[in-house]
Amino acid sequence: MTKMCYGVTPNKKDELHKAVASGYMEEYSTGAYKFVHDSVREASYNLIKLDERDQFHCSIGMELLQVYNAEDQEDVDSSMLLPIADQLCHNNLGSRFDLAELLNKAAKKAMATSDFERAQRYLTQARTLIPEDQLWGDHYDFAMQLYLSLGQAAFSSGHIELAKSSWNQVIENGRTLESKLDAYYLSHRLLHHLGQTEQAYKGSLQVLSELKETMPRAGSVDQQDMIATFNRIEEKMNNNDTLVSMNEVSDQHYYRLQQFLSQAAFLAYYRRDSLLPYLIARLVEISLDHGVSKYSANGFAYSSFMLSIYKKMRQANRYGKVALDLLARFEDSSQLIHVYLSYYGFVGAIFEPIQLAAERLHTGLGVGQSIGDVTTALLSGLMYIQKSFVAGNNLSSLLAVSSSWSAGGVT
């Protein structure tokens, strides 16, 4: 509230001085003003007629915007941006691309602090400031980024239909496959969240096909062939002394292949699809041949899980360790839950203290809840209880943890 009083015009300054003299407001040495009490602020606000309040907020926002635009934005307090955006969301401002850009900038700031409801409000308002035909014509790049961000904010705040329609806008209006890939990826995640894993999986495979990746026929993946493939991969790993410090993938095509192979492998697990080991091995091979990305951590973690199924525990542990190193390198929480579940849930507890495995699975549970990956969070929670029970934790403490899942969004 205080920040919103910086840089006001002389007329407004006179009015603020009168409010200070009357005992309604306080002036700070920084030049900021604040009501002496919330009840005074509320009483003052109630003096404004209901049908005039939107215009009142808008006028404040426009005046603050003049101050913001007049300042060197490298020096201006960035916390001023969100209050300006809050005021501008109260009225129809007509067609204003500059204001849409400001609201988009404010939305990014809000999303960086996980304030997704606020970000969604800004982006929804920004969408109304440019006619649809101009948005996808003169402002195509801005429109693509706006709808992608709106979908993310909507999904993270529980507005599923808005998320779906926003990403569909990107898919329908994108001019190239590359421009649509992020929307495809997020839409597949949404479908899985809604229990439509089959559709999400087919979508991931379709994108891989459009990226010129050839898949083997369903049912043609043999276990012995895959074990031989993982052995061949390990030979490549043995010949690479700087595995974890490998260069990041620089070719966007191979980065996208890693992204969608990781997603397809994740979805194949839930479908118990026979292509799962192939997808995992292909992801790791591309990482070794063309450079690593955050998705490579998933590839090595999923390989660890797969090798444990094949009873190749020594290899499984090695792959899992590489996954943990890559996770630490890229510091991406959206991959953490999959790496921790795959390694600590099936392999790590054999080679590490079981208490550590339980702790990591509990961390995965919390991360899954925070990013909306409910299914994987639930699996992490079940694994956590199993490992904790074996480690000797008493049942009452485990019951307390499981009871908290509902509050955290895992049911």
Image: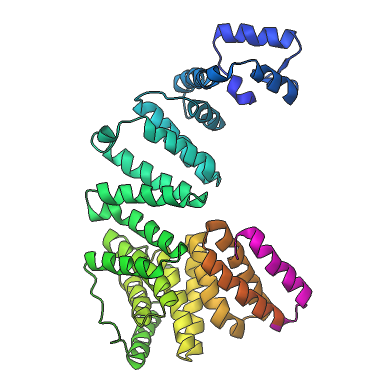
Question: What scheme was used to colour the molecule?
Answer: rainbow
Q: Toward the viewer: 163 or 314?
A: 163
Residue 15 image position (x, y, % from top left):
63, 8
Please say whether residue 227 is one of the residues in the magenta stretch: no
Q: To which quarter of the image does residue 213 belong?
A: bottom left
Quadrant (top left/top right/bottom left/bottom right) for the C terminus: bottom right
Q: Main secondary structure of the magenta part?
A: helix
Q: At 47% from the left edge and 47% from the top edge, which residue is drawn? A: 153
Q: At 55% from the left edge and 16% from the top edge, which residue is drawn? A: 7
Q: Toward the viewer: 240 or 105?
A: 105
Regarding residue 15, the answer to whether it shows in the image is yes
93, above or below 376, in the image: above
Q: Which residues are magenta?
A: 390-411
User: Would you say 210 lies left or right of 202 here?
Assistant: left
Q: How many marks?
A: 0
Quadrant (top left/top right/bottom left/bottom right) for the N terminus: top right
287, above or below 193, in the image: below
Please say whether residue 406 is one of the residues in the magenta stretch: yes
Q: To which quarter of the image does residue 183 belong?
A: bottom left
Residue 103 image position (x, y, % from top left):
44, 33
